[in-house]
Amino acid sequence: MNLTPLLSIVIPAYNEAERLPAYLKAVRTHCDCKLPGSYEVIVVDDGSQDGTWEWLQGAGTTWPGLRLIKHDQNQGKGAAVRTGLDAARGEYFLFTDADGATPIGEEEALRCSLVAGRDIAIGIRSSKDDRVKRQVFRAIQAQIFRLLVRAFFGLQIRDTQCGFKMLTRASAHSLLPILKETGYLLDIEMLLAARDRQLEISQHRVEWTEQKGSKVRPVRDGLRMFFGLWRLRRTLRKNSIESRQPAGLPLVATIPVSDPLGELRG
């Protein structure tokens, strides 16, 4: 294992004893083939109580590329992502959900974008892509969330919440000191901070399949979604983050090669 691997993969995990093992197996197979000896996988156990940590400790004994970090108490997905990114040593940092909804093979397109000079590459779930499979109410909820994000922040991102994002090490180190969110709003906070710093963001359609065992609850999380965005907007206004975005600069850079249907152009 190189001291400075090419890719660091950060996986936040909370009570994922059922879903994480299969995804980690896929991650190891992919990385051993595509990035032999030049990757690390950092799993941050966010206070799990279902045996996730115990299973991870066993897996770590036979996998030199696996690094484990444990939060004694549940702090939230955003907090776990921040912990993992702070510990990462690679040239590129990918964070991805523990359920494996996005196949790890999709990382290659994001990594190519960063190699080409972009600062951040994010996966998006397009309604026009038949590789995206989710329940109707989840699709409707995602669309409402997207409209609220645009209304509150003017952020022209197709899908802020897809849990598959990659950053250069320089970009991550630039953003981490100012990120405070501990929950699902970390993605938005990160993208807004990147916009504020004029970082180039590319968007890429990725395969995504809704997994069993989702912790999302439509009514409860719908209310949390609205009030969370409202709170974040107030916080950002107080810190004058939005006001530092220079007028006339593009909010997002896109890469045509990852846009076969033309949805992202323009």
Image (cartoon, rainbow, N blue to C red):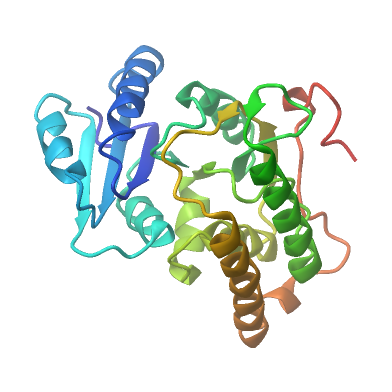
Residue pushed farthest top?
33
Task: From the top left corner, tell me how far across and down residue 228 is, in percent.
Answer: 58, 71
Task: From the top left corner, tell me how far across and down residue 215 is, in percent.
Answer: 44, 50
Q: Of 1 and 139, which appears nearest the observer?
A: 139
Residue pushed farthest bottom?
238
Q: Residue at x 63, y 57 (%)?
A: 191
Q: Residue at x 86, y 36 (%)?
A: 265
Q: Count up the numbered dots.
A: 0
Q: Of 129 and 200, which appears nearest the observer?
A: 129
Task: From the top left corner, tell me how far across and down residue 75 is, in percent.
Answer: 33, 65
Q: Of 53 and 201, which appears nearest the observer?
A: 53
Q: Residue at x 73, y 47 (%)?
A: 140
Q: Residue at x 61, y 40 (%)?
A: 121
Against 84, is 133 above or below? Answer: above
Against 112, is 52 above or below? Answer: below
Locate the C terminus and report the quarter of the image it occupies.
Answer: top right
Against 52, is 149 above or below? Answer: below
Locate the N terminus and report the quarter of the image it occupies.
Answer: top left
Q: Of 148 and 3, which appears nearest the observer?
A: 148
Q: Is 36 on the left or on the right of 176, as rendered?
A: left
Task: From the top left corner, tell me how far across and down residue 102 is, in percent.
Answer: 52, 30
Q: Is 112 on the left or on the right of 15, as rendered?
A: right
